[in-house]
Image: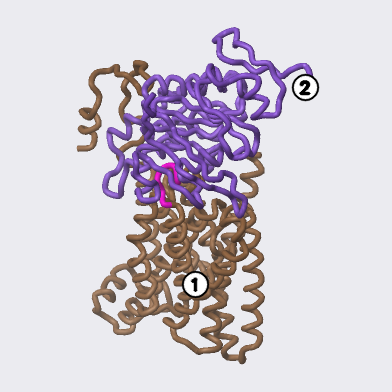
Chain colours: A purple, B brown
Amino acid sequence: MNARASRLRAEGMTVGYGHDAVLSKLDFQVPDGELTVILGPNACGKSTLLKSLSRVLTPSAGKIFLDDVAMEKSRTKDIARVLAMLPQIPEAPSGVSVADVVARGRYPHQSLLRAWTDDDERACVDAMTAANVLPLRERSLEELSGGQRQRVWIAMTLAQDTPLILLDEPTTYLDITHQIEVLNLTRRLHGAGRTIVMVLHDLNLAFRYATRVVMMRDGRIISEGSPHEIVDADLIARVFDLEALVVADPVTGAPMVVPAESTL
Amino acid sequence: MSAARNRSGGGRGLFRKDMSGRSVVSIRRVIHADFPVRQLVVHLLLALLLAAVAGWAMTQGERNLGPSGVYEALMGRGDRLNVYFVNQVRLPRVAAAIAVGAALGLSGATFQILSGNPLGSPDVIGFTHGAATGALLQILVFDAGPFGVAAGAILGGFGTGLIIYLLTRHTGLRGYRLVLIGIGTGATLGAVNSLLVVRASLTQAQTAASWLAGSLNTMNWSKTLLIASGLLILSPVLMKASGPLAMLRFGDQLAVGRGVRVNAWRVTGMFVGVLLVGLATAMTGPLAFVALAAPHIGRSLTASRGAGLTTAALMGAVIVLCSDVAGQHLLPVSLNAGVVTGALGGLYLVYLIIVERRRA
């Protein structure tokens, strides 16, 4: 089997806050055209990995390549036309409207001389339609529910119109209905040809939606591949220290983790 | 022309595919109009207000001239004393009020964005006090002229920046911690300023104290040109910074993800902000609350989606000019502009608290 094409990859990457390295000499590839979900216990380094891949954090050693060019050698605006990242729980200044927020996604496509264009307009309307927030466009972000707000942030990320999209826990603080709504949106985007990487906490939803999962623990990748192929009780035990049954999801047939009786 | 472009641009037919493959109705210009109408109207009104107040201020003073008298004097005709008062006293003072106000408004807007906190303006987080310390040292110790005082104020501002940077190194320049550390630093520097005045000789202390009260009484063309050229030199940087600063309002991570060179713009913004507040303070002494209130009021008027720099500059100019004019001509006793801005700022804070309470 030949190696999968990958526009985004890390080589020998070491990242940490202060002196403690969270990730140490990690190699990682984002295969094109996959919906990758990174999973692992708290503090395993999954968010750090996502932040490093999107240059929010700078590795102390190693390199990250985007289209075979080391990221630190590219202009950050050029990167932003290929790679969009949505941080966990972004902040918004008070009083901004939904349309204001979404329009921010066009920043990398604009310059001092090139103001708002029809392309910008079209990308924003498309993004708001896809995220189902077009009717909310005049509303202030503060008036919206958590689920609506999260969809607005995703719309902003989509308006950036990039082939690669990284989402850091996009379902946090959402109820189950809104979680499904956000995940369905990511699935539609993946179906339309985008490469998506996200960090999630809910294993069963992850296995249901991911075409590829990456299981992490203590800053290392324990296993990666299609959920059908790699997920079993042994893997869950190795990654989470949790004794569990892995059964087929009655709806989709994807692996489903059910904590064992001994954990009660 | 833009309207024609809107109608003809882009879409083919009413329905097209969106990025996830569904058919959607094509809608033009629902996000951004070509011209932010409300913002333009507010800018125009503020500019008109400035022109009207400036024009009226030119007629007022010891020699009350009508509009035609002012015009004659500006042209250098008529009574020689009138010509002198209008060209060498009133005009530079009005111009300085506008320039100083604009500098304070810009500095306030920049710092509030960088600190991510509406209270993070240079007069709250100690930069004004620091600039005053630098200026006082020049006045009291070195007996310097306007350029020396300006240099001292700017150096004082940068010194304050260094202190605050060292104290917030571990937590970053955002949020309430910065505001608290800034207030503490400002209070300490305020004490240093008082000490400097107390230790000075009587005549020097008088000069220093009247400078500390913040006024435009001693404005002349050399001072006015100094602050105006500072603004002129920094304005291209500010224009270029307004996009990145507008993104920084959404936090560093989000800005990085959209391709903003966050660290470079933070340093640039800080540098420009300190220069502006230093220059302004050097000219007039500390004018309280202008940097804090101007960006706020401006933003609430325009509902601006951007960095709001132009609005803050205009609003700052309006506040300082009106305060100076009111202090000179409208109140029963003549007051320094700094006293008037202080009083207005206090009222504004009370108003803000009441509004916030109603909202809560």
| Three-letter residue code for mark 2 | Thr
> Residue A263's mark?
2
Q: Quadrant of the C terminus of chain B?
A: top right
Place residue A175 in its image quadrant. top right
The answer to whether tags 1 and 2 share a subunit is no
Few, some or many residues within 10 Å of mark 1 (<14, 14–19, 20+): many
Mark 1 — residue?
B281
Q: Residue at x 55, y 85 (%)?
A: B207
Question: Three-letter amino acid code at disc 1?
Answer: Thr
Instruction: Answer with left or right where residue B4 lies relative to residue B29.
Output: left
Between A199 and B182, the residue placed more toward the observer is A199
Q: Nearer the viewer, residue B208 or B67?
A: B208
Q: Residue B50, position in %: x, y?
A: 39, 60
Q: Residues within 10 Å of mark 2 (few under 14, many from 20)?
A: few
In the rendered structure, the answer to whether residue B46 lies left or right of residue A250 reads left
Q: Which residues are magenta?
A: B256-261
